[in-house]
Every structure is written in structure tokens, then in C-alpha cells.
Image (cartoon, grey):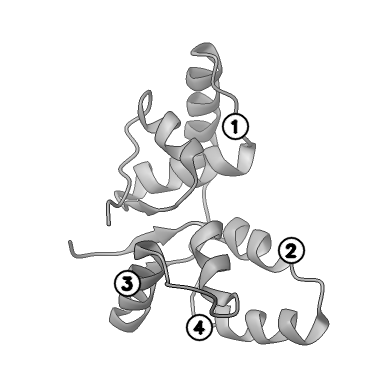
Amino acid sequence: MSGLVIVDTDVWSEGFRKRVGDPSAERLFLAELVEAGRVQMLGCIRQEVLQGIRDRAQFERTRTALQAFEDRAPRAAEYELAAEFFNTCRGKGIQGSSTDFLIAACSVAWGMPLLTKDKDFQRYAEHIPLRLVRV
């Protein structure tokens, strides 16, 4: 696989946690993506990663580390696609957050796969053209 990959909050969070046990395949792949310069950041993912950090020093370390990744801002088309995806999934009885559907819409619209451990995205991908990274 070549090109940029959107990395979801859960994978970033694992990457920043203290090393306990064996790293997941997603965490190892994140390290490869970072080294190769193939990570596409979204502002909403940056926010989710940072908003869960209570310790101020850890917050600053994480913020500094994430500054290496430039955001690509969604435009009206991505927000509209996110709303379509939300409605499609809701019509199938699948609930999700606005942020999840925005991430999915950016992934689809920009032709970038999503690296995530979040099972919700697997359910969404059954009904929308979302491409998930399999590691």
C-alpha cells in the first residue's frame, strides 16, 4: 500500500501510552506510517487524542509530537458526505458520532484508507464505501 493513511484516535492513543505488553499490529503499522511520512491528520482526530489527557506535561508532549502532522481540513463536500453516511447507517439501525462519520467521509472523499481498531467503523463499512486498513 502506498499513499497517505488517516489514523484514527484509538491507534494514536495506543501509540502514546506507556509501553505495556506487546504492541498491536495497528500500533506497529502506525510507526511504519510515521517513519514513511504517510500519515494524514485531521483536526478532529487531533482534538480527540488531546482531550483525553489529564496530565498537563503529557498533554504538552503529545501536542508537540502531533504538531509534526499537518491537518487537512474538510470542506463542505466532506461534511455533506458525512451527513449522508450518518443517514445511511442510521437507516440501517447503526448509530455513530458525527466525528466518526466526518472521519469516514474524509477517508472516502480523499481516497485514503483508515487505520483504526474501532469496531464501529467495521459496521459502517458494511453500508458505506469506507476502506479500512487490514494489518
Q: CA distance from mark 1 to mark 2?
A: 19 Å
Give the residue at mark 2: 52
Q: Do we see residue 71 in this rendering?
A: no
Q: Which residue in the rendered view is the most extreme toward the front?
A: 21
Amino acid, disc 1: Gly
Q: Nearer the viewer, residue 113 or 133?
A: 133
Q: Which residue is mark 3?
A: 38
Toward the viewer: 103 or 81?
103
Instruction: Tell which circle, 4 or 2, labels the residue nearer the N-terminal end.
Output: 2
Q: Which label lies toward us, 3 or 2?
A: 2
At 40% from the left and 65% from the top, the residue drawn is: 24
Q: Classify the position of the C terminus by image quarter.
A: bottom left
Residue occupied by mark 1: 96
Q: First in sequence: mark 1 or mark 3?
A: 3
Badge 4 is on which residue?
Answer: 68
The tag earlier along the polypeptide, 1 or 2, is 2
- Where residue 64 sits: x, y (%)? 63, 86
The mark nearer the N terminus, 3 or 2, is 3
Q: Is residue 132 above or below residue 21?
A: above
Taking the image as shown, residue 16 lies to the left or right of residue 50, namely left
Q: Which secondary structure lies at badge 1? A: loop
Cα distance in 3D space between marks 4 and 1: 29 Å
Q: Say what amino acid the circle numbered 3 marks.
A: Arg
Residue type, numbered disc 2:
Gly
Q: Which mark sits nearer the N-terminus, 3 or 4?
A: 3
Residue 37 position, x and y percent, is 33, 79
In the displayed structure, 93 sits above or below 113; it is above
Residue at 40% of width from left, 36% of height from top? 122
- Tell me the distance, in whole angstroms, between the alpha carbons under discs 3 and 4: 12 Å
